[in-house]
Image (cartoon, grey):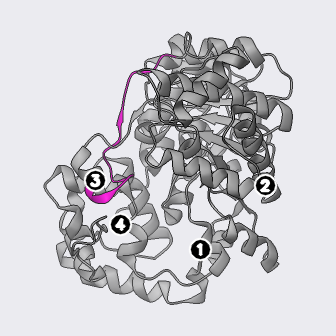
Amino acid sequence: MGKLSADHLIIGRSGLARALYDTVRDLPVISPHGHCDPEWFAADAPFSDPANLLIVPDHYVLRMLVSQGVRLEDMGVARRDGAPVETDPRAIWRRFAAQYHLFAGTPTRLWLDYTFETLFGLETPLGPETADATYDRIAACLAQDGFRPRALFGRFGIEVLATTEGALDPLEHHAAIRDSGWGGRVITTYRPDQVTDPEHEGFAGALDRLAEITGGETDTYAGYLEAHRVRRAQFRAHGATATDHGHPTADTADLFASDAAELYDRIRAGRAEPGDAGLFRAQMLTEMARMSAEDGMVMQIHPGSYRNHNAGVFRAFGRDKGFDVPTRTDYVTALRPLLNAVGMEPNLTVILFTLDESAYARELAPLAGAYPCLRLGPAWWFHDSPEGMRRFREMTTETAGFYNTVGFNDDTRAFPSIPARHDMARRVDCAYLAGLVDDGRLREAEAFGLARTLTVDLPRQAYRL
C-alpha cells in the first residue's frame, strides 16, 4: 500500500531521530484516556465485520464523508426514530472504499493505512476496485481467535487502557473484566457531565438515578456532593485513577456554600434563571477539583468543543456523529477561581486540554509553568496529527518544559487505530527532540532519556498508573 505511515515524512530527515525512535518504538502502550467499549474485553467476542469495526463508530471517518454529501443513514448509523438505515456491512464498506481518496493527507488516512498494512496485511491500496477483496481479507482475519479483543490488546503491547464511563454507568463490564481472571489492565474513568451539566438532556432524571445508585439523596446540595464522593469511590473500586470533564468552556467558580446551595436548589426545582447552567458547571469544576485533592483522582478538563453543532443531526442520530466544532477558549481568567481555591494543593493534578491552539503559548504553557497542580494534555482531537503534535511541542516547551506535559493519549473509540496513533506520537516527539539536539539546545544523551520519558514515564506518573 506504499507504506504511508509517515515513516519518511517524520523520521527520515535525521539519523538521530531514527535512533531515538528505535529506542521507544517497541515500548508498552500507555493509553490513559479513551473511549473504547469495555464490553469488548469483558465478552471477548469476535468483532462482527470490517464496517462496524472501522467505519460506523468512527466520527473522524463519518464527518469527512458527510462533508462530501454521503448520508449517515447510508453508512449504517442508527437513527433515534428507528427509521431504516443501511445494514449490509459490505455495502457500507463499498461506499467507504469509493470515497477513500477523500482522506488523502489526513491523519485518519495515516491511521487507517497503518492498520490495514500492519494488522491485516493488506498490500494494495483501498479503492472501489479493491473494496471486496479488502473486505474479505479483514473479515477472514476477524474470524480468527488472534483478532479477538483480548488477543489484540496483547498484540498491541498495551500496558493499561482506560475507558470512559458516565456517572450512571453500571460498570458491569469492568466488573466482568475484573472477575474473569484475564491479565489485561482495563480501567474506567469517571465522566460526570450528565449530572453536572443542567443543559444535558434528562438532567433531572439523572440526578434521581444518581441518588439511587449511591444510596443517598440529591434533593439537597450537600447530598448531591456526597453522592459524587460515593460514586467516585465506586469508580475507583473498578480501577479508575482519573475523572474527565467535557465542559463547553473552562469557566470555574468558587461560590460561598450558601450561594452554591441556592443555585442548586433553583436548578433542581426547575426554576433555573439565565446564566445558572453555566455558573453551575463552573462551580462543579471547582468542586470536582476539591474532591480530587481529597481522593487523589487525576482531573482532566476537555473544554472548547461546540458539540452537536447541527441540531438536525443531533435530533436524528444523537451525539458524536462528527458535528462537534472547536471554539475559542479562555483559560487565564476562567481557571482562576479553581486555582485560587486548590491550585497549590499537593495531592491535586489537573490535566488541561484544548482545541484552541492560540492558547498554547499565551495561556496554557505559562499556567502549567507556574501552578504545581497543572499539566498539559497532548494535542487533542482535531490536532491529533503530525503537524498538530509538532505545533504543540513548539508552542509549549520553551515555557512549560517537557515535565509539565503528560506524554500522549489517544482519546479514541477506534481500538485498531491505537498502535498507529501512539506510533505517530513517538515519531513526532523523536523528530522534535532530534531537532533540539541539532540546534544545540539539548544534549544527545538527554534526548534519549526524554524519548522514553515522553513515551511511558510521564503518562504513568501523571495518571498515577
SS of the residue at dot 3?
helix
Please, what is the three-letter code of the amino acid marked with disc 4?
A: Ile
Location of mark 1 (residue): 40
Distance CA(mark 1)–CA(mark 3): 28 Å
Instruction: Locate residue 277 relative to residue 344 in the image: left or right.
Output: left
SS of the residue at dot 1?
helix
Q: Which residues are magenta?
A: 315-330
Distance CA(mark 4)–CA(mark 1): 17 Å
Q: Is residue 235 above or below residue 192?
A: below
In this view, the mark in front (2 or 4): 2
At 60% from the left edge and 29% from the top edge, which residue is drawn?
A: 264
Specify which label sits upstream in the sequence, 4 or 1: 1
Q: Which mark is residue 55?
A: 4
- CB under 8 Å between callouts 2 and 4? no
Distance CA(mark 2)–CA(mark 4): 33 Å
Please, what is the three-letter code of the amino acid marked with disc 2?
A: Gln
In this view, the mark in front (1 or 3): 3
- Position of the N terminus, as image quadrant, is bottom left
Q: Which mark is residue 234?
A: 2
